[in-house]
Image (spheres, grey):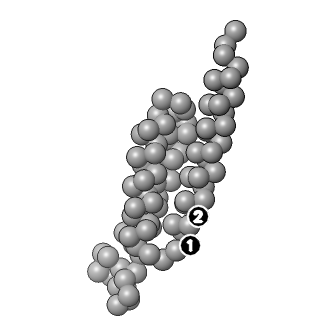
Amino acid sequence: MGNSGATFYSAILLLVVVVVTTLSALVARYVRNRALRLCTGSGLVVLAAVFSELSLILTVLIAALGGAIIAFGIKTKRPDGETTTGKA
């Protein structure tokens, strides 16, 4: 049989990662600060790489969420009303 303590702590760690990922994605989605969005998205991509040993599907989901937040950060409007691509 496996080590039930390690399984329990791994499950707790995965739940914490999912909650933190979801909260950071929600904050980045509703805050219009471009730098915050880019940093949060990059952080999620790094977090996905760190947890790649625990769960493949979690890694893919976190990395995709980070990429989407980076895309939102790139398209965020600047104070002068233009997006970073130069189109209003």
Quarter that holds the N terminus: top right
Task: Let me know if residue 71 appears in the view.
Answer: no
Q: Is residue 48 visible?
A: yes
Q: Is residue 38 left or right of residue 7?
A: left
Residue 80 position in % (x across, y down): 35, 90
Q: Is residue 21 above or below residue 81?
A: above
Q: Quadrant of residue 13?
A: top right
Amino acid type at circle 2 is: Leu
Query: What label sits on residue 22 in the rendered view?
Result: none
The secondary element bearing badge 1 is classed as helix
Residue farthest along the front direction in this orientation: 5
Identify which residue is drawn at 53% across, 45% down: 61
Position of residue 73 in the picture relative to residue 65 (left or right): left
Crowd class of label 1 (few under 14; some 14 to 19; many from 20; radius 10 Å): few
For this view, does 46 lie left or right of residue 20?
Answer: left
Identify the residue at horizontal 67%, vertical 13% (top origin): 2
Point out residue 73 in the picture as x, y percentages from the top left corner: 41, 68
Mark 1 and mark 2 in contact? Answer it, CB < 8 Å. Answer: yes
Residue 27, how many percent across, how many down? 56, 67
Tag of residue 26: 2
Q: Residue furthest left?
A: 86
Residue at the spot x=68%, y=23% of the render?
Answer: 5
Can you identify the residue that label 1 sits on?
30
Label 1 vs label 2: CA separation?
Answer: 6 Å
> What amino acid type should be assigned to the residue bearing mark 1?
Tyr
